[in-house]
Image (cartoon, grey):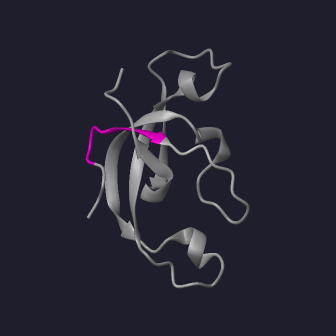
């Protein structure tokens, strides 16, 4: 069962463990809004080491404001970036601003 639903505001964990990770460094610690949930998949961080990828993880498409991701962003304030992030990298956050 998925922990988050469409419209939930989430924060990406700010963790930097060694190894093969599927969460971009530039998005860690940032707040975003869940836009879609494409499904539940084998954990790619485990698959990278030849393990079975269990437990499977829900995948979310999360929308972030570009101006909050990039401190020097000068484009329109409404510009966004979408990133697919597995559930184990997300924590609940407050309501969207």
Residue 78 horizontal side relative to residue 69, left or right: left
Q: Quadrant of the C terminus?
A: top left
* Residue 17 spot, x, y in % from top left: 69, 57
Q: Determine the residue positioned at 32% across, 49% down.
A: 36
* Residue 34 spot, x, y in % from top left: 35, 42
Number of callouts? 0
Q: Is residue 1 above or below residue 11?
A: below
Residue 76 horizontal side relative to residue 24, left or right: left
Residue at the right extreme of this rendering = 18
Q: Determine the residue positioned at 31% across, 28% down.
A: 95
Q: Quadrant of the N terminus?
A: bottom left
Q: Is residue 48 above or below residue 12?
A: below
Residue 81 horizontal side relative to residue 58, left or right: right
User: Closest to the observer: 93 or 25?
Assistant: 93
User: Closest to the observer: 2 or 34?
Assistant: 2
Residue 79 lies in the magenta stretch: no
Residue bounds of the magenta highlight: 5-11
* Residue 8 spot, x, y in % from top left: 30, 39
Q: Quadrant of residue 58?
A: bottom left
Q: Determine the residue positioned at 63% across, 20% down.
A: 73
Q: Is residue 3 above or below residue 79?
A: below
Residue 91 horizontal side relative to residue 95, left or right: right
* Residue 25 spot, x, y in % from top left: 66, 45
């Amino acid at each position: 069962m998925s922990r988050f639903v469409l419209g939930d505001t989430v924060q990406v964990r700010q963790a930097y463990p060694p190894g093969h990770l599927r969460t971009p460094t530039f998005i860690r610690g940032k707040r975003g809004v869940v836009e879609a949930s494409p499904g539940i998949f084998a954990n790619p961080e485990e698959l990278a080491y030849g393990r079975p990828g269990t437990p499977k993880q829900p995948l979310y498409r999360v929308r972030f404001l570009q101006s909050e991701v990039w401190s020097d962003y000068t484009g329109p304030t409404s510009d966004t970036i979408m990133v697919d992030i597995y559930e184990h990298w997300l924590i609940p956050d407050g309501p969207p601003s």
